[in-house]
Image: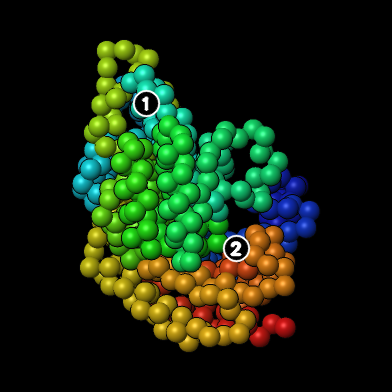
């Protein structure tokens, strides 16, 4: 078998995520990463314009994070987290609570964005169950995306990739997100559902709805929706899995709000993109509904690798870097550079809309097929960018840039120039 190349072995043994294995091009073998660059087996480099599925913050192979993980690995690599604790988990929880909105009081660890959402939904549901209150309705946004496990799929909007599972998902009431032009429809739908149902939770991606097409809406609108929900005692869940840790220009998208969500889901950038880890945080009042002499009122959720010390060490190191003035300056420069490119493309005839929130820039292309995840333009663009050494993964007809903060000015300019070149594809 050793005569096979790594690509041939990959084809023989591996099933890749979100990939039609029959028709997809062979995967690119990446052997190294450095800053915003991915380096392939053949020496070719690719600018990682999407932070490797939105996880990387400070660059690939960052020596400071790598060193902190290595030190932790030699000290304590893993320990069961029921009945035990360890310093990196305690320190990380304390630091996260210092930077999250001030109503957050408790941190629950899990492994990825989807499980952070599962935990949030379970907490909200059991919060009422533990008090003997019957409140069952969950509200979420149309076009929202919260992950690939069953609870997260249920909360997600009507996405084309969840069709096979529709009959197995639990009922969630979806309202239009308050996108520009449909603010009133969103408020009215929320009002109607709150009036007709006993609502348990409202889950949302604050300000930027990622996988649904980098849809963006104003914080004032979310404030209004949360206010309405809070008035009825609804638990508001901010899924900041994608927006967390600086992507929107502030540490969390919720920092643009006046209202404070009750639960937060964080993952992706949490470890700087080094290790899979997530947290679900909540208020003291929510935690108190689980605090009891009754064992059945405990939160029955946990994973083998809960609060993995290596993940915690990576997250602590990533937070050190994120809080440095240099990193905040990098974020500021990306925002400014994006603004320049946005203005340059503003009235291009092939563009429906170009929108920006912080370091995230999304360009919606006109296409005869309309807006859809499976739009053929997507595959054409993807290959076009890869050929030119840039990793961009359009969502249907939406090309977006979501770079690591260490990206250099000339690397961003190269991304802009390949996007401009793509505008000339007939
Ligand atoms: N929530 C949001 C807002 C996301 O963008 C994602 C992933 N793209 C998830 C949840 C799920 O995260 P994971 O892929 O780590 O399960």
Q: Which element is circle 1 on?
A: helix
Check mark 1 vs ligand 1: CB closer than 8 Å? yes or no: no
Check mark 2 vs ligand 1: CB closer than 8 Å? yes or no: no
Point out the frontmost of discs 1 and 2: 1
Side (left or right) of 79 relative to 351: left
**Residue 203, can we see it?**
no
**Place of residue 204 in the rendered image (x, y in percent of width and height, measured from the top left):** 43, 49
Sort mark 2 into few (<14), some (14-19) or many (20+) by Cα contacts within 10 Å. many
Q: Which element is circle 2 on?
A: loop
Residue at 45% of width from left, 84% of height from top? Answer: 343
**Residue 260, can we see it?**
yes
Q: CB under 8 Å between callouts 1 and 2? A: no
**Place of residue 342 in the rendered image (x, y in percent of width and height, measured from the top left):** 46, 80
- Residue at which label 1 appears: 128
- Quarter of the image with the C terminus in it: bottom right
**Place of residue 150 in the rendered image (x, y in percent of width and height, measured from the top left):** 57, 36
Side (left or right) of 316 relative to 23: left
Side (left or right) of 212 relative to 369: left
Residue at 53% of width from left, 38% of height from top? Answer: 172
Task: Give residue 235's quadrant in the image.
Answer: top left
- Residue at which label 2 appears: 395
Q: Nearer the viewer, residue 331 or 233?
A: 233
**Between discs 1 and 2, the one toward the N terminus:** 1
User: Is 183 rendered above or below residue 129?
Assistant: below
Q: Residue furthest top?
A: 294
Task: Give residue 73's quadrant in the image.
Answer: top left
The colour scheme applied to this rendered structure is: rainbow
Sort mark 1 into few (<14), some (14-19) or many (20+) by Cα contacts within 10 Å. some
């Amino acid at each position: 078998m050793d005569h096979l190349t790594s690509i041939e072995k990959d084809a023989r043994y591996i099933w890749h995520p979100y990939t039609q294995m029959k028709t997809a091009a062979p995967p690119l073998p990446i052997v190294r990463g450095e800053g915003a660059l991915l380096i392939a087996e053949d020496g070719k480099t690719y600018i990682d314009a999407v932070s490797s599925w939105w996880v990387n913050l400070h660059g690939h192979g960052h020596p400071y994070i790598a060193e902190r993980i290595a030190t932790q690995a030699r000290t304590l690599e893993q320990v069961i987290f029921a009945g035990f604790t360890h310093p990196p988990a305690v320190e990380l929880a304390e630091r996260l609570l210092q930077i999250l909105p001030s109503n957050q009081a408790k941190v629950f660890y899990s492994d990825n964005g989807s499980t952070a959402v599962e935990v949030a939904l379970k907490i909200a549901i059991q919060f009422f169950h533990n008090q003997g209150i019957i409140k069952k309705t969950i509200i979420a946004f149309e076009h929202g995306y919260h992950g690939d496990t069953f609870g997260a799929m249920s909360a997600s909007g009507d996405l084309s990739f969840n069709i096979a599972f529709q009959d197995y998902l639990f009922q969630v009431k979806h309202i239009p997100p308050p996108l520009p032009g449909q603010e009133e429809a969103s408020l009215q739908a929320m009002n109607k559902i709150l009036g007709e149902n006993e609502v348990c939770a409202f889950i949302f991606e604050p300000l930027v709805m990622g996988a649904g097409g980098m849809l963006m809406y104003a914080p004032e609108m979310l404030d209004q929706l949360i206010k309405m929900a809070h008035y009825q005692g609804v638990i508001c869940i901010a899924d900041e899995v994608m927006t967390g840790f600086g992507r929107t220009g502030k540490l969390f998208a919720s920092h643009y709000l006046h209202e404070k969500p009750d639960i937060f889901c964080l993952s992706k950038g949490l470890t700087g993109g080094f290790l899979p880890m997530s947290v679900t945080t909540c208020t003291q009042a929510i935690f108190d509904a689980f605090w009891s002499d009754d064992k059945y009122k405990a939160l029955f959720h946990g994973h083998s690798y809960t609060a993995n010390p290596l993940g915690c060490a990576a997250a602590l190191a990533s937070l050190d870097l994120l809080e440095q003035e240099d990193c905040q300056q990098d974020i500021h420069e990306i925002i400014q550079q994006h603004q320049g490119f946005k203005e340059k493309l503003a009235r291009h005839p092939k563009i429906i809309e170009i929108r920006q929130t912080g370091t995230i820039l999304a360009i919606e292309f006109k296409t005869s097929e309309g807006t859809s995840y499976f739009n053929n333009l997507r595959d054409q663009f993807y290959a076009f960018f890869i050929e030119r050494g840039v990793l961009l993964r359009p969502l249907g007809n939406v090309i977006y840039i979501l770079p690591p903060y260490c990206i250099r000015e000339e690397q961003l300019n190269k991304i802009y120039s390949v996007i401009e070149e793509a505008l000339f594809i007939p």
